[in-house]
Amino acid sequence: MRAAFATAFNDADPLSVLEIGDAPEPAPQDGWAVVDVRASALNHHDLWSLRGVGLREEQLPMILGCDAAGIGPDGSEVVVYPVVYTEKGDFSILSEYYPGTVAERVTVPAYNLVPKPAELTFAEAACLPTAWLTAYRMLTTRGRLEADGSVLVQGAGGGVATAAVLLGTALGARVYATSRDAAKRERIAALGATAVEPGARLPERVDVVIETVGEATFEHSMKCAKTGGRIVVSGATSGHLPRVNLRRMFALQLEILGTSMGTPEELADLMALLARTGIRPIIDSVIPFSEARKAFELLHSGDVFGKVVLDHAQ
Ligand SMILES: NC(=O)c1ccc[n+]([C@@H]2O[C@H](COP(=O)([O-])OP(=O)(O)OC[C@H]3O[C@@H](n4cnc5c(N)ncnc54)[C@H](OP(=O)(O)O)[C@@H]3O)[C@@H](O)[C@H]2O)c1
């Protein structure tokens, strides 16, 4: 079957070790299901895999991709939940230990198939399992954001952050967002957020801060949280060792909460929210699978706003 895979690692030039070609058919274990992939979506995770982050030489070639929607073994439309437990009981995301989703077919435990609501297209649904699920869990289960609450999203041009802005507004909250880039701030404001420069003073302190940037924004996140506020962390793009003002933390009874991905139930709840409210993931481009290299080049260029999706029918 055709697939996109890493053949080696190259930190300086990750696309040089990307191959689009023939890969072995997936071999499902007992209790696993094969999904006929209709659309997959790329993440920065795929570029990190090509650089060798999270993979070992002996795992090569590794099919890339964490996100997909397609047709399950019973003919129903499904979204693939990408977290799989390894034989050792470790937690792993597709393409880290088991082959990923940028392929004609992918195999996962049957438990990982989540029904796709008819309201969402395959392309839209394929955008959700990684960045959107992470953002949804950050706001809801971990952040406990209420409908009349307030949230600050740091580094709003990012994948998780853009999802958090859209979901925050869909959940009825007041959304503030920082971005270093004026053009991104304009686009974020058009999505319903109050967009400000990094470090700017907000009109109010917020209930929840969505942190994926790390060192560059963490001090600001601490200053912007109100008493009892929650700073929810799922990434540290700019560095993972920020200075934390512990006096402020205990005096304001702040909570700093780590989180990763989400559960299949949260993925189903997220899709129900989208079906109900009409909000949809922002898609930068849908690219035919036959031109898959272009999709990786686009992601690598950084010149994207929203998800890069591959249409597996073409
Ligand atoms: N734990 C999980 O389950 C999970 C899931 C998905 C992602 N992640 C992690 O979350 C992070 C974000 O992922 P993503 O896919 O959203 O990444 P992304 O699309 O690359 O976005 C990162 C954003 O961070 C901001 N940023 C980067 N460097 C910065 C700096 N030095 N100063 C200020 N802002 C900076 C930028 O926002 P502006 O340009 O707008 O300022 C950028 O758009 C990554 O570290 C990723 O590994 C974790």
Image: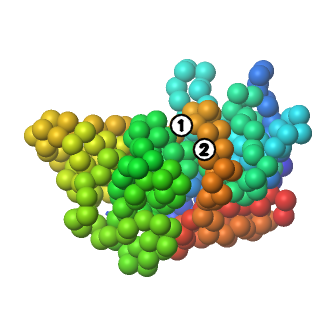
As drawn, the label of residue 221 is none
Look at 66% across and 50% down and name the residue there.
276
C-beta proximity under 8 Å, tags 2 and 1: yes
Dot 1, crowdedness within 10 Å: few (<14), some or many (≥20)? many
Q: CA distance from mark 2 to mark 1?
A: 10 Å
**Amino acid at pointer 1:** Gly
50 on left or right of 230: right
On the image, which quarter does residue 231 sit in? Answer: top left
Q: Position of residue 270 (x, y in %)?
A: 60, 44
The mark lying in front, picked from 2 and 1, is: 2
Quadrant containing ligand 1 reads bottom left
Dot 2, crowdedness within 10 Å: few (<14), some or many (≥20)? many
Above or below residue 248? Residue 152 is: below
**SS at circle 2:** helix
Q: Position of residue 84 (x, y in %)?
A: 61, 31
Q: Which residue is mark 1?
A: 262
As drawn, the label of residue 270 is 2
> Is residue 3 visible in the rendered structure shown here?
no
Q: Position of residue 279 (x, y in %)?
A: 62, 58
